[in-house]
Amino acid sequence: MPNEALAKRYAQAVFDLAGESHKTVDVGRDLRTVWSAMEDDDGVVRFFFAPVIERSEKQRVLLEAFKGKIEPIALHTLLLLVRKRRERLLPEILQQYAALEMAARGAEPLIVSSAHKLPPEELASLVERLSKIYNKRFEVEERVDPNLLGGVSIRMGDLAIDGTVAGRLDDLSRTLLTH
């Protein structure tokens, strides 16, 4: 994906610049806050993404709305995206930036999906076992997926572990078909 690679380069540049000022957390927070505010109003997103609206108009609006209210690095990142006509990269840049923040904390994302919310002790035990097995620290995102019949699905970066009932039935079906 060319957009992902480009977003990764922007995110790395912004992260490095913010790191030099010891403001990585503040810049990330401000960029997420701005995007969240934009997402709340469909008209604002359309304005920000619209190629027919002059870049100078978008920059004026961003400056009026955010100058002095967010970190200058965050504001200049937004202005740069507008100047380069790369506004649509902002959501992907935010994802890449969040991954850089997490890596800087020495953690990796762990997504645990189940049909029902897991009891806290069970989730903690699962995360602890995975941490020992993979010798990693995780930041856990728990998701409830009512479409799952039961069991747990785990995603750690590119690695997926399917312990769901549907996954086990698929495995059994493949085994039966090969014998």
Image (spheres, helix red, strand yellow):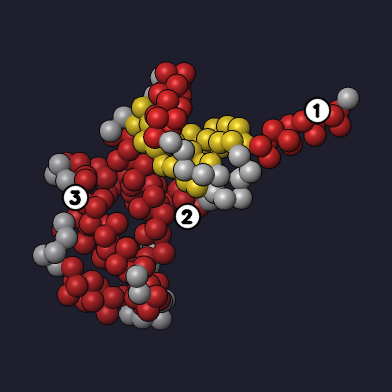
Disc marking residue 175 = 1
The answer to which quarter of the image holds residue 43 is bottom left
Mark 2 / mark 3, whichever is N-terminal: 2
Q: Distance between the residues labelled 2 and 3?
A: 25 Å
Q: 96 or 160, which is in the foreground?
A: 160
- Disc 3 residue type? Asp
- Disc 1 residue type? Thr
**Percent position of residue 96, x then y:** 38, 47
What is the secondary structure assignment of the residue under circle 3? helix
Q: At 61% across and 50% down in the image, what residue appears?
A: 147
Mark 3 / mark 1, whichever is N-terminal: 3
Disc marking residue 26 = 3
Q: At 21% across and 76% down in the image, what residue appears?
A: 60
Q: 179 or 108, which is in the foreground?
A: 179
Q: In front of the other: label 2 or label 1?
A: 1
What is the secondary structure assignment of the residue under circle 1? helix
- Disc 2 residue type? Asn
**Percent position of residue 119, x then y:** 43, 36
In the rendered image, is residue 161 in sight? yes
| Label 2 CA crowd tier, 10 Å (few <14, some 14–19, many 20+) | few
**Residue placed under numbered mark 2 in the picture:** 3
Q: Would you say 103 lies left or right of 134 here?
A: left
In the rendered image, is residue 127 in sight? no
Q: Would you say 152 lies left or right of 42 here?
A: right
What is the secondary structure assignment of the residue under circle 2? helix
| Label 3 CA crowd tier, 10 Å (few <14, some 14–19, many 20+) | some
**Percent position of residue 55, x then y:** 31, 75
**Percent position of residue 123, x then y:** 43, 32
